[in-house]
Amino acid sequence: MPIFEYHCTKCDKNFEVLLFGEEEATCPTCNGSKVRRLLSCFSHKSDGEFSSSKGSVCSSCSATSCSTCGHSG
């Protein structure tokens, strides 16, 4: 059961959703159905080190998302 990333064109928010079978994604913020699937990055752990296809986006650490480290952006 993969988790997919989407962008809502109605409220301009990105979100993740777990979909089963042929389910369609709707935005959890505005309940909009005009969503665009995003290309997701991936990460893996090898020899105790994390590596990501996205690289670091956080200004305070090497996490790939501020939700990972808790920094407010």
Image (cartoon, rainbow, N blue to C red):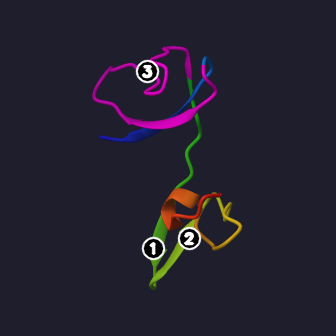
The x, y position of residue 23, in whole percent, is 33, 20
Cβ atoms at labels 1 and 3 below 8 Å apart: no
The x, y position of residue 3, in whole percent, is 39, 41
The x, y position of residue 45, in whole percent, is 45, 73
**Secondary structure, magenta segment, majority class:** loop
Amino acid on which disc 3 is placed: Thr
Disc 1 on helix, strand or loop? strand
**Range drawn in magenta:** 11-35
Amino acid on which disc 1 is placed: Lys
Tell me the CA gap for discs 1 and 3: 31 Å
Q: Residues within 10 Å of mark 3 (few under 14, many from 20)?
A: some
Residue named by callout 1: 45
Quarter of the N terminus within the rendering: top left
Residue named by callout 3: 26
* Mark linked to residue 51: 2
Tell me the CA gap for discs 2 and 3: 30 Å
Tell me the CA gap for discs 1 and 2: 6 Å
Sequence-first disc among 1 and 3 = 3
- Residue 24 is drawn in which quadrant? top left
Amino acid on which disc 2 is placed: Ser
| Residue 13 horizontal side relative to residue 44, left or right | right
The x, y position of residue 39, in whole percent, is 59, 40
> Quick check: 50 above or below 43?
below
